[in-house]
Image: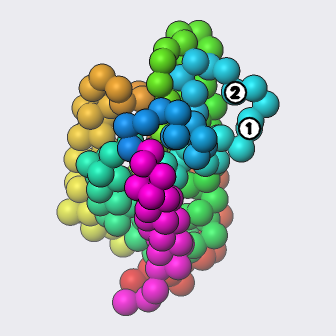
Amino acid sequence: MRAMAGTTFLLATIAIAFAVELARGALGNDTVLLSLGALPDSGQLLGQYWRFLSFGFLHADLCHFLFNVAFLLWVCPVVERRVGPIVLLSVFFAASVLSGVAILLKHVVVPAAGTSLGASGGLFGLLGAALVLVYRIPPANPRLRRGLWLTLLGGIAFSVLPGVSMAGHVTGLLVGVLAALLVRLHVTSYLT
């Protein structure tokens, strides 16, 4: 099996960020999470635009972290095998940043206490891309397609729970779908 450089990079970056959170005692502590780069649910960014990037690597607790790692390990290889690590990372970062923008806009309208964070906006972007790519690049594995659709249904169902950002998830998903529709498919050598 070919090394998955993009998947490995995302996994390592998220794991390092979580280790920093643990070392700083950030889990459950909004003040420390904000100091590490979470988005403020007050809707007040105060010119700190770097938070649109950093919030996507932080996680609220161990369960949140493990759930997103499992999501990453399932979806990233599907995308990376079809379009390579550069497109994978581009889709993740675009979906993550734009999901952060959507979350912040929601909180400008409906401010709240707390923080928003997590890789799921970027991962929903990769899920959207994977769903498009498994139809654009033959041969298609029907079990893989069904698994991705079930992941989407489960993810949307999870998104309606309190404290989970439907705005971030849907925005990430739409960014991924659009990116996969626009990407040139000359990089088919990644298929296994």
The structure residue drawn at horizontal position 30% and vertical position 40%, both measured from the top left corner, is 155
Classify residue 162 as left or right of residue 12.
Answer: left
Q: Position of residue 64 (x, y in %)?
A: 32, 46
The structure residue drawn at horizontal position 47% and vertical position 75%, both measured from the top left corner, is 8
Image height check: is 57 above or below 37? below
Using the numbered discs, state the Cα–Cα distance from disc 1 to disc 2 in whole angstroms: 7 Å
Q: Secondary structure at mark 1?
A: loop
Image height check: is 169 above or below 118? above
The structure residue drawn at horizontal position 36% and vertical position 30%, both measured from the top left corner, is 164
Classify residue 97 as left or right of residue 115.
Answer: right
Q: Position of residue 63 (x, y in %)?
A: 26, 48
Q: Which secondary structure type mostly characterizes the magenta part of the structure?
A: helix
Q: Position of residue 156 (x, y in %)?
A: 31, 34
Residue 27, picture quadrant: top left
Locate the N terminus by quadrant. bottom left
Classify residue 154 as left or right of residue 182.
Answer: left
Q: Secondary structure at mark 2?
A: loop
Residue to which mark 2 is pinned: 45
Q: Is residue 8 magenta?
A: yes
Q: Is residue 128 magenta?
A: no
Q: Residues within 10 Å of mark 2 (few under 14, many from 20)?
A: some
The residue segment tinted magenta is 1-26
Q: Position of residue 122 (x, y in %)?
A: 51, 49
Q: Marks 1 and 2: CB-CB under 8 Å?
A: yes
Residue to which mark 1 is pinned: 49
Viewer-closest of 58 and 160: 58
What amino acid does circle 2 point to? Leu
